[in-house]
Image: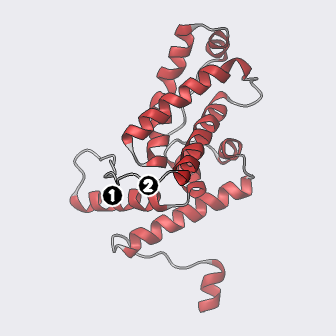
Amino acid sequence: MAPPVISDEILRRAQRGDKAAFEAIVAEFQTSIFNYILRAVGDRALAEDLTQDVFMRVYQKLPRFSFRSKFTTWLFQVAKNRVVDEFRSRERRPPAEELEYDTLRVADPLPEQSATIDAIWRAVERLPLDLRMSLLLRDVSGFTYDEIADITEATLATVKWRIYQARELVAQSVADEGLIEARPQRGRAAAREG
């Protein structure tokens, strides 16, 4: 699934303060930004607040958007930075009461599919933030590796490693629950054991 796109003309109108143009931007990107943030933070109410905050920041910063990068890259970078800010502020706050994770459901999945889907999302939730964000940008939001490198301000090699590592950790976690077969070990770990 590719991220949504919007015309430069609408962006330029929004930069000049055209309310309808900005509303078009929000309408086009709100769902994809919300889904990305929801999977990053795991809390629907918080994701709604952060999504709103992202669009407030976009509204404030849009006049300075220079078109040197794709708008979607810039927008998701704003979202990524807001999520990182939230996690930093959480580290400084005492932990709140644990809330139950609100998972997205597949329409009428078979019971074994539902268990696997739930296990995958639990594993994604446990990933370190940098791995989780890269994986979500690729596999949920549909960005290319180059776009993810721009959004996360990381090298292309780092992005590829993060996504590979995230997928390996998710697969291992789901395998540990007995829901899929364990993947054969690759690389140095396999060589050491062989």
Q: How is the image coloured?
A: secondary structure
User: Which type of secondary structure does the marked residue at label 1 adopt?
Assistant: helix
State the image quarter where residue 107 is shown: top left
Judge from the rendering whether residue 170 lies leftward or rightward of residue 154; answer left or right: left
Q: Furthest residue to the front?
A: 94
Q: Secondary structure at mark 2?
A: loop
Question: Which of marks 2 and 1 precedes in the sequence?
Answer: 2
Measured along the vertical axis of the image, is residue 161 above or below residue 12? Answer: below
**Foreground disc of the pair 1, 2:** 2
What is the x, y in percent for residue 123?
A: 43, 62
181 and 70: which is toward the camera: 70
At 55% across and 52% down in the image, what residue appears?
92
Q: Position of residue 120 (x, y in %)?
A: 40, 60
Q: Is residue 4 visible?
A: no
Q: Which residue is mark 1?
A: 118
In the image, what residue type sits under mark 1?
Asp
Mark 2 lies on residue:
95
**Residue 51, numbered label:** none
- What residue is at 32 percent from the left and 47 percent from the top? 102
Above or below: residue 78 compared with residue 18: below
96 to 58, vertically: above or below? below
Q: Residues within 10 Å of mark 2 (few under 14, many from 20)?
A: few
The residue type indicated by label 2 comes to Pro
Which corner quadrant holds the C terminus?
bottom right
Q: Residue at x 28, y 61 (%)?
A: 115
Q: Position of residue 169 (x, y in %)?
A: 51, 67
Separation of marks 1 and 2 at Cα, in angstroms: 24 Å
